[in-house]
Amino acid sequence: MHKRKERRTTSHLSSSLNPRSQYPPPMATVTHPLHTSTFKLPLPIRTEISHPHTLSIKASLSTNAPLPGRKLRAAVIGAGPAGSSAAEALASGGVETFLFERSPPTVAKPCGGAIPLCMLHEFDIPSHLIDRQVTQMRIISPSNLTVDFGKTLRANEFIAMLRREVLDSFLRSRAVSRGANLVSGLVTDIEVPNTSSTAPYVVHYTANNSRHALSVDVVVGADGANSRVAKSIKAGDYACAIAFQERIKLPDEKMAYYENMAEMYVGNDVSPDFYAWVFPKCDHVAVGTGTVRAKQDIKAYQRGIRERVKPKIAGGKVIKVEAHPIPEHPRPIRVRGRVALVGDAAGYVTKCSGEGIYFAAKSGRMCGEGIVKASEGGDRMIEEKDLKREYLKAWDAKYISTFRFMDLLQRVFYGSNAAREALVELCGDEYVQRMTFDSYLYKRLAEGDRWEDVKMVCNTIGSLTRCNIVGR
């Protein structure tokens, strides 16, 4: 076998979308079996971002079959942060991409809406999408011990708060601007080929009160915790929490308190295994809670958080009520055949903090980039081993330890009110705060001080001992 010459393809992934621009969604061409088509890479869109992200694709000694006369064809099911980020990377990299979104596209799952600072730059999120820049955060214990958790934030640091429907719409439109074909319809079934490594997957969906089918080479499942794609490949079950949230419009004098303030409440009255929150939005606050152990009692816990914050939200009017399942850990199987799961469908929500937006978008992008690389810009078929190598292995190497660590923290600090008191007490330590924010805001392992780390461990043991946790 002779060695092919190295080829590089660079595609711009970071151009900001003009929010006033409209991108009419192209209709999917439905054929079966796969038709032969030509595909042109979209021209880069002019942007004010001075440092665009680029995707470099390096040809390898792949033995995968070439696709003469057409490009690799991918279906991305679900157009939230995970699906839209995957579709953007795929379309930008030369893969013929179909992005499925169930109508109506303005519906978003209940979500606190906090995203880390690094996501704004990494995914080029324009500032006008941000509702609030939170610089003050308070965590309140079961006994109402209150700790100001934002006092170590630097002058240029904040937690961005936004509405999911706004973010999702932006990312979805940007994926379309890069060449993804938006299909507004409900996916009802994924037809999985029996044995052939090149036979198409057939996506069955309904749109405009009629049934359709689309044949593709690759499927990316970004369709949430109740993923139909995951069921189609028998990806296994996982524990799900339920999140319940009310959006409450407050009187101006009440809203002024939450201008740049977020609050987290812990206690058996608001959740037996998670926390409740009050997060500020553009003209209202999101008040919610979640649980995995007692989902049937979620409304009782919602009443609990409303009671805890009653004086602060007095006179407010509920304008929206939302509920949605939230995964508690990664699925047993996230890649099978030429199908990959990303975002909530893969189980990428951290315990303890409940963070999922960044990990959804990041997993989608990494999966899309991995497919582009393995297919050499959409020119070759890919296999399961390619998805595992380019996406799954890279993801686990970068993030799986974070998920395990957050799981440990939840088991230690969320099991009882005594443990929650210890957690809040620890959060008062400025070193703990700085390490927490460095890790959260920048998604990197914070470089600490050795002696401060030892001190933090001793303080943790001391807090747990005082709260009668150690030695039980």
Image: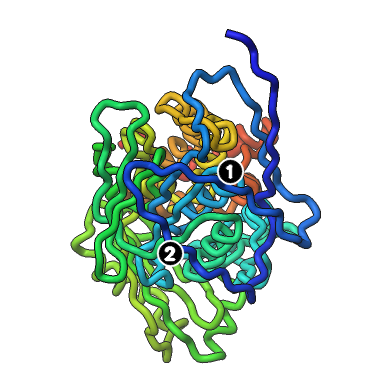
Q: Nearer the viewer, residue 312 or 124?
A: 124
- In the rendered image, the quadrant that contains the N terminus is top right
Q: Is residue 135 above or below residue 284?
A: above
Q: Residue at x 25, y 70 (%)?
A: 209
- The residue carrying pointer 1 sits among few (fewer than 14), some (14 to 19) or many (20 or more) residues within 10 Å by Cα, namely many
Q: Which mark is residue 161?
A: none
Q: How many marks?
A: 2
Residue 60, picture quadrant: top right
Residue 76: horizontal and vertical position, in percent? 42, 50
Residue 310: horizontal and vertical position, in percent? 39, 81
Q: Is residue 171 above or below residue 393?
A: below
Residue 80 seen anywhere in this rendered image of the structure: yes
Q: Residue at x 54, y 65 (%)?
A: 167
Residue 3: horizontal and vertical position, in percent? 64, 13
Position of 253 with respect to 301 (left or right) is: right
The amino acid pointed to by label 1 is Gly
Q: Nearer the viewer, residue 97 or 422?
A: 97
Residue under label 1, please give it: 94
Looking at the rendered structure, the secondary structure element under dot 2 is: loop
Looking at the rendered structure, the secondary structure element under dot 1 is: loop
Position of 128 with respect to 219 (left or right) is: right
Q: Nearer the viewer, mark 1 or mark 2?
A: 1
Q: Residue at x 74, y 50 (%)?
A: 52
The amino acid pointed to by label 2 is Cys
User: Which comes before the other along the chain, label 1 or label 2?
Assistant: 1
**Residue at the right extreme?**
50
Residue under label 2, please give it: 111
